[in-house]
Image (cartoon, rainbow, N blue to C red):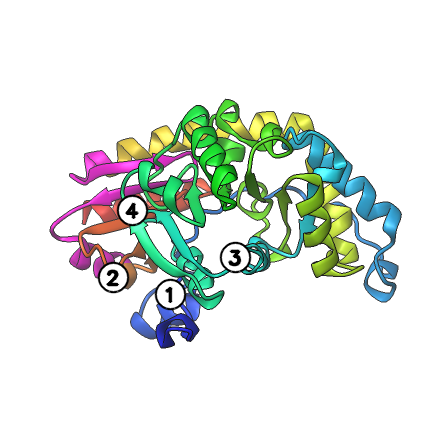
Amino acid sequence: MIPPHSLAPLVHGGDLDAARKLFPGAPEPFLDLSTAVNPHPYPIPEVWPEQFAHLPDAESLNLLTGYAATAYAAPSEANVVPAPGSQILMTLLAGLVSPGHAAILGPTYAEHARVAALAGHEVTTVKELAPLGDADLAIVVNPNNPDGRICGKHELLRIAEQQRARGGLLIVDEAFMDAGPRGESLGLHVEDAHVVVLRSFGKFFGLAGLRLSFALAATELAARLRASLGPWPISGPALTIGKAALWDWDWIDETRMSLGHAAVRLKKLLADAGLEIVGYTELFHLVRSPDAQQIFERLGRAGIFVRRFEQEPEWLRFGLPGAEAQWLRLETALRA
């Protein structure tokens, strides 16, 4: 039986309709720092009207798959499955494992627990890696959301080997790895290790609304996922934009560097405001304060929306501002 709470939608960042209801008198436009998405998106190439009128072609999908295999260091194109966002991949993967015990390293992105419960698993959240080896479905977000924790590659490969022995599966969600330590990615190991890696396009490239993600998996499992998604998993415009972005190595390298500089600036700004840094990635910082609720409300009244957490009322997560005026706006509100 599916737990009733698993059917209810979860609260996520980026809900500006909710922000406007909470703070109806706030100045517009809202500065949305709740999503941890690159505020400087990839420059969208020209998209022809025909790409909206015609079904996506197989050649473009194959090219995108090949570019993703290179970008994410997968063993081959056969190990890569493009999909319209990670959410559908999470749901499909949880359903491919027979209902049993799902263990999730947390606290982390709450959708993983929800979709595992929907697939019939008994879900527990653990604080250390060791218990994951005894689960039928083990899930790790690496780097973690919301605290930026990074698990070492070799530790995760040991968990994957335990999963192989018991016929389970390890899922590693690397949504924030594009700007993180590339050497800790498990993309290269998906054929030999019992692991599936999820990669999100929208966060690093600043195009979350495009809904594009990839699963990296062993050839047989990748084929099952591909069949489940059907013949046109990605829209024509997403194919065009994804191909251009994943092959633009200059932009990728420059963006990794600029995000690193921005992360240092945000860390100093938050620390100068007296907030305790709990953890971070290049795309967000998590802070702790006994006054977190008051800070959330004060920023909201100033038209700045950050991410709060019901289970951790002293936590707030800040994404990166973009334009200089946005940085000054945040600095002014924090000083207030």
Q: CA distance from mark 1 to mark 4?
A: 21 Å
Tell me the magenta residue range: 271-299
Picture residue at 86% right of the left edge, 66% below the top: 53
Disc 4, SS: strand
In primary-sequence order, the first of circles 4 and 3 is 3
Relative horizontal placement of residue 242, taking residue 211 as reference (left or right): right
Q: In the rendering, which numbered label is found on residue 94?
A: 3
Tell whether label 3 touches label 2 (CB within 8 Å): no
Which residue is identified by label 4? 126
Q: Is residue 293 above or below residue 285?
A: below
Relative horizontal placement of residue 293, taking residue 125 as reference (left or right): left
- Determine if the magenta segment contains residue 330: no
Q: CA distance from mark 2 to mark 3?
A: 25 Å
Give the quarter of the image for residue 43.
top right
Which residue is identified by label 2? 310
In primary-sequence order, the first of circles 2 and 3 is 3
Q: Residues within 10 Å of mark 3 (few under 14, many from 20)?
A: many
Q: CA distance from mark 4 to mark 3?
A: 18 Å
Q: Is residue 102 visible?
A: yes
